[in-house]
Image (cartoon, grey):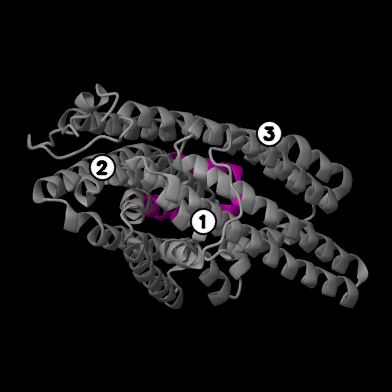
Amino acid sequence: MSTQVDTFGRPAIPAPVTGWRRLFGDWLLVGSATTVCHALGAVTALLLRMFLSPAQMGVWQALKLFLSYGNYANLGISKGAAREFNVALGHGHTDSARHGLNLAFAVNTISSLVYATVLLTVAAWIALDTGGRQGTTWAIGLAVVAALAVLSRYVTFHVTILRNAQAFAATSQLSLLEAVATLAIAAPATWLWGLPGLYGGTLGVLLVSLVFVRRHRVADLHFAWEWPEIRRLVGIGGPILLAGALSSLLRSLDKLMLLSYLGDGAYQLGCYSAALLVSTQLFGLGNMLSMVAAPRYGEIFGRTGSRRQTAQLAAQTTDLHAAAIVLPAGWAMVVAGPLLAWLLPDYRAGLPALPWLATGVVALVVAMPANRYLVAVDQQRRALFAVAVATGAAALGNHIALQRGLGLEGVAAATAGAYALFFVVQVAASLWPVLGWPSRLRYLGMLALAIGPTLAVAWHFSLQDSPATVFPATVVGHAVIVTLVWACCMAIGWQQGHWRAYMKRTEN
C-alpha cells in the first residue's frame, strides 16, 4: 500500500481502498438524496398533521416506537454479520462472511416473527378486552405493526448489506423512492381514510421498498443454522446494538427528564422542541457522513489488518466530518433562532437552548469516526463504555440543571457538556492509543482549525441579541461573516491537511 505524508512530512495516512474521490462522490450523492428526502419528509409530516388529530398522531407515534423495538429482537446478529462482511470485502474472502449473512437472515426472520406474534397477541387481547373505537384503533395498529416488523427487518438488513458493499447509489435511490412513495401513497390514504389509511399506506410503502431491495440486492440470503457461529456473531453485534440503544437514550435523556421533573413538562418540552428540530437535522447530516465513511474503515482493516492505518483513516475523515457539520451548525446558531422566533412565536422560550444543542451535536458528529473505527476493528465494547459514561454525565447534569431551576438553557448546556465528554472518552478509548504523536497533533490541530473559529464567531453573534429582536439584515450579515470565517479555515486546512494531494489519487 502506498503512503501519504501528514502535516509534518512523515508517512502516515492511508487512503480508502476506493480512493478519496469516490468517498467525496458518495458523500455528495447521499447528501443530495438526503436533502431531497428531508424536504419531502417535511411536506409529508405537515400533511399528516393536517389530516390527523393530535390524539391520532399520538397513537401513530407510539406505534412507531413499538416498530423500532423490533430492531433489538435479533440481539445484534445482523450488525455482527454485516461487520464481518464489510471486513471480508477488504481482504477479498467473502465465503464465510456470506455464510454469516445467511445465519443472520435466519435469526432475523425467526426473531421478527416471534416479535410479530407477541404484537398480534396483544392486539387480540385489546380487541377482546377493551372494545370500542379506541380499542379497535390500537388493535388494528398493533396488527399492522406486526406485519411491518417482519417486512422492515428484511428490508433493513438488505439496506445494511448494500451500505457495507458501498452501493450508495442504490441506497440513495431507495431513500428517494420511500420519500416519494410516502408522499404519494401514505398521505392521500390518510386524507381519505384517516389513521387506518396511514396504516395501509405505510404498509404499501414498505412493500415498494421490498420489491426494490429484491431487485438490487448484493447477496442472495438463505436460511442457515450453526449455533457456535451464531453465538460468535451475537458476541460481535450485541455490544454494537447495545451501544446504539444507549446512544438513543443519551440523545433523548433531556426530553425524558424535562417531562418527569417539571410540572408543566409537556409545555416546556414543546418549547424545547423548536431547538430540537434544528439539532435533529444537524445530527442527521452527521449520521449521513458517518454512514458513507464507515464501510471504508472495515474495508481497509480487512485489506491491511492494521489498526493503526484504520485509525489514521478514521482520524483523517474526522476532518471532513468537522468541516461539513460546523458551517450548518454556525448557520443554525445565527439564522435558525431568529427565523423560528418569527415563524413560531409561541416557542420562543426554547430558542436559547439552540446554540448549546448545535454545539453539542458538533461534538457528537466528530466522535462518529472514532466510534465506527472501534466497530471496524472489533473493539465495540469500548464504544459501549464511552456512551455509558456520557449517559451518566447527561443524567447528572440535567438533574442539577432542573433542580437548580436553570431552565431549558441549563438543560441544553448540560446535554452539550455530556456530548463533549462522549467525544473525549470515545477518542481516548479508540484513536488516541493507536495514533502516534505526529498524527495526534495533526488530529487536534485540524479539529481546532475546522471547528474553533467558526463556532466562536457564531457564539459571539448568538449572545449579542435575543432571537426575537434581531433584524433580518443583521441575520444575513451574521451568516455571511460565519461563512467567510469557515471558508478561510477551510482554505488553510486544504493546504495544511494536504487535501489537494490526496484528491489527486483515485485509488489507494
Q: Residues within 10 Å of mark 2 (few under 14, many from 20)?
A: many
**Mark 2 or mark 3, earlier in chain:** 3
Asked if residue 381 lies in the magenta stretch, the reply is: no
429 and 101: which one is in front? Answer: 101
Q: Which of 36 and 3 is in front in this view?
A: 3
- For image coordinates 31% across by 38% down, the residue present is 320
The residue tagged 2 is 313
In this image, 275 relative to 83: left or right?
Answer: right
Vertical side of 344 occupied by 253: above or below? below
Considering the whole magenta stretch, tell me its main secondary structure: helix
Point out the image quarter for the C terminus. Answer: top left
Q: What residue type is labelled 2?
A: Leu
Q: Earlier in the sequence, mark 2 or mark 1?
A: 1
Residue at 54% from the left image edge and 57% from the top image edge: 103
Of circles 2 and 3, the one toward us is 2
Is 357 colored magenta in this rendering? yes
Q: Which residue is identified by label 3?
A: 180
Mark-to-mark CA distance, 2 and 3:
36 Å
The mark closer to the camera, 3 or 1, is: 1
In this figure, which residue is indicated by the disc labeled 1?
78
Q: How far apart are marks 2 and 1 (CA)?
A: 25 Å
Residue interval drawn in magenta = 335-362
Left or right of residue 139, residue 13 in this image: left
Return the residue nearer the eye: 165 or 320. Answer: 165
Which residue is pictured at 59% across the width and 65% down the height? Answer: 73
**Residue 469 in view:** no
Measure the alpha-carbon separation of dots 3 and 1: 28 Å
Q: In which quarter of the image is residue 39?
A: top right
Q: Is mark 1 on a helix, strand or loop?
A: helix
